Image (tube, rainbow, N blue to C red):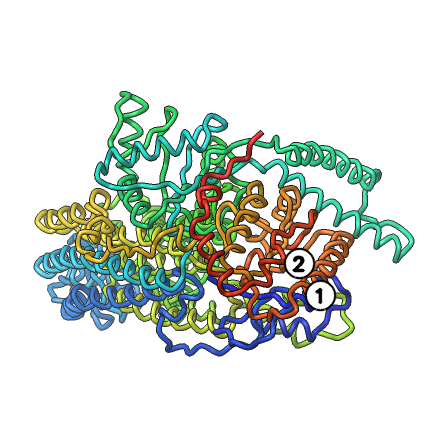
Amino acid sequence: MNQIKIDAENSLTFDPFRIPASIALAKIHQKASICGENEQKSDHCPCCGQHIQQREISLCQNRLDLAFLGQGMPLFFEMTSQLILIVLILFTVLGIPSLIANIQNHDCIGEENMFYKLSLNGLCKQNCPQNTTDFQSITKLVHSNDCQTICAKIVDICLKTSVLKMSYANKQFDETSKLVQSILVLCSILMFKFAMIRVRISQRSTVRICDQEFISPSDFTAMLTNLPINEYNEAELKDALLDFCYQFDEKGQYEIVKIIIAYDITSFVECSREKMSLEKKIEKIENYYKQYGKYPRSLKTNQFSQLKERIMVLDQKLMTIENEVENQQYAHQTQVAFVTFQTKEQLQNVLDQTKLSYWEELWIRFKYYLINRQDQRGFYFKNRIIIFCRAPEPNDVFWENCGFNFQYQFQKRILNFFITIFILGASFTILLGLNILQSQNLSSFDDVIMIIVTLVISLIITIINQIIYYFIKLLGQSEKHFTKTHHDVSVATKLAIVQFFNSGIFTKVINILVYNFENDKADNYAATYSYSRQGGVISDAFFLLIVNSFFVPIFAYLDPLYLYKQYQQYFFKIDNNFNQIEANKIFEGPSVLLYEQYSYICLSLWISLLFAPLLPISLLFCSSGLLLYYWIQKYLLLRRNSKPPFQSFHLNREMMNLFELSPIILAVGQMWTDYIFNSSSAILTVNFISLGFSCLELITPATRISKLFDKKGNIFTEKDRYQDVYLKLPTDYDRTNPLTQQNAILEFIKAKTLIDTNYIQPQVMDTKTALYKYAQMGGVQFMRNTISLKLKISMMRKIKLIRKARQIAAIIQQQQDEEISQDQQEPIYSQTPEYMIVNKNINLRKNSLNISTDNDYNNKFQDAQNYNFSKFLSPNKFEN
């Protein structure tokens, strides 16, 4: 994990709200926020604690060397490179043979066709019919010998341009070549399935390698949801879990170390954040009044007094909750709990038992709630089916969202679903209008203008995709997910699906609708014409693939927001009106958003597979585009972006589930293409077989099959015990949960001090202060901020009080530990730099521990080994 140290002296003098901001401090933060390898001897940024001196990482360095950013980062680049290779193999197996067959056929007519030239000059009826080869090739495409029909459809037939020559339309009458392509699609689906199994095994190996270097609490912890609210305690849940474990594994040994229940702090956090926002508004109004001697014109009558009254109401609500917290009477449980097992093997066995596909989970729920039958793979507790998943990192948990029940989340998701449908409907309407406008002017466009118009429409589709991206991000935040991982997975999944419909499905459907709209008479071959004519599906798909494969990665490099930041930095003046927070934000690099990158890769893969039967060259575009995107993203990460927080493997695992659905899209694309071009029943039969094999992923996921071939998957060493590594973990679920944080840290300090006499004790917040700090900095609030400032507090008055308390504490600490060097201080993690706000002066160390002989130390180490770990490893209870 990203373990950093904070320079205590600089941190105490750092003023995040100083005006004007210091350019020197902003540039120091800029150096500290880049992604590089920390130098052993380095100064630290006073605002975020990152190392200032860092070694630049080579772009060609091994992906595993990025493991210090978390498992998710090397997994992302590994998965991208593996998908590039898979798509290249598909292009070799399916694309090249199909492309050769398309080019060698001559079902589309050439521009030199004499009857076609006469028709363009208005001489169709005068020269129809003809007993020539050129005329017969046109009648074959029109599917009629009637001169009136031929003259009406002559502008819509397949013309052998450079694009259509490479397409399926150029062999639409060659049944043998079409059958061969359907068989190749079937082979490609099987190859893709086996390749994804191999990818799963490879990624598990990468996770194991990263685990050897970086130990995380999530390696031992499962997250349980759908628990009964306020109807159980830790002991009941622990007994039920152990009974369940021994039901499916009688010979196994299972030990539950602790259970951390998430408490409902939603009301407190929302009131705190609303109060902070109102205080900032009042501060701005008062500053305006002091400067100009009058209130702003935008201030309505009585609005100032209304804001103060609202703050008083919020203060009263917060005071009620604070009293309950201080008296230890606040015990509002939620449906979420975190269960920590003693070993990784125990956790993995439980996860393997409870891991269900979507349809399996639906079937188990149906059996239990409708016919009252239990399944051995389900965990039932208090008449509920409890949902298991591997816990994300402790800092990824949105504790304030745990208070929202399933009904609220379900309602939000249903509402967001209809909003998403509305957004897709609006996009569909815009694209339909553009296509109608393009189609009505086809006859007046020459080839160059036609290419430009089609390219512009493809760019507009890409712009609409970006607009959809921002709407989906806002919708994802409103769904109140329990963890950042769930939020990222939700956003990435919605983005991939919605943009796939906008770019792929709509391109096909709209062209068919527009063609039928222009022709009053019904035509059985209308869909064929809409595909193969100039400006039809094939032409649109070709330019859309080019824009998506090459323009989007280039736009990612030429980021307008980054260029705007560069502009701000260039004209940044010493005498400025920015505070230090805003200045640091200007000089900091862009954030790394893995869900955005995953959604783009998924979109590129899906639309290339959808159009691969129609345009085999799409597979080459996809692999080339992904290769370009791979190196651009690696460059941005190591040279431009700010260092991301610890990235777990959970997002990668969930996105792999989407990638494994890709064969279904390839099978549907082939079936759709053959249906449009009226292929024979034998070809359609092969297509149904392909679709059947691709849908096996819904029944037998590749992740399950890969476990059968992963011989190292169940190898766990003796060192992988929670009790052995507990004191090495920089964070844990009970130490980040605001309501259990105080007791958990005190017990951690007590155990740590027994082993390490030179351990520098962090100062501990009480529970109320921890809640206020979380409301200001943690959870969703932290995710919304583009810069992670560790000393960010809402009001300057609070900051001065905290700084004064820290100065006193630092002086006392310096007097006690003059002989202890700064390098011996305990490292801390990125989101919570230290337990720094002090309401109670806590000091557990005694003088006898500071001055001890080697024998005394050995005795204390032995005492630590014999220490009753169950006292603090047992579930933390927030008792009344």
Q: Is residue 276 visible?
A: yes
Residue 3 horizontal side relative to residue 765, left or right: left
Report the front residue among 846 and 651: 846
Residue 667 in percent (x, y) is at 21, 51
Q: Residue furthest right?
A: 293
When the figure is inspected, residue 777 is found, relative to residue 9, above or below; the finding is above
Residue 207 horizontal side relative to residue 866, left or right: left
Quadrant of res 879: top right
Question: Which mark is first along the chain, 1 or 2?
Answer: 1
Residue in the picture at 74% in, 50% down:
280
**Callout count:** 2
Residue 193 in percent (x, y) is at 20, 55
Per the image, label 1 sits on a secondary structure element best described as loop
When the figure is inspected, residue 112 is found, relative to residue 444, above or below; the finding is below
Quadrant where the C terminus is found in the figure? top right
Residue in the picture at 59% in, 45% down:
742
Residue 660 in percent (x, y) is at 27, 53
Give the residue at mark 2.
791
Report the front residue among 701 and 874: 874
Residue type at tag 1: Phe
Residue in the picture at 14% in, 55% down:
186
Quadrant of res 725: bottom left
Q: Which mark is residue 331?
A: none
Residue 844 horizontal side relative to residue 162, left or right: right
Marks 2 and 1 sit apart, C-alpha to C-alpha, by 9 Å
**Pointers 2 and 1 in contact (C-beta within 8 Å):** yes
- Label 2 crowd bin: few (<14), some (14–19), many (20+), radius 10 Å: many
Residue type at tag 2: Leu
Give the residue at mark 1.
14
Report the front residue among 249 and 860: 860
Residue 327 in percent (x, y) is at 65, 33
Per the image, label 2 sits on a secondary structure element best described as loop
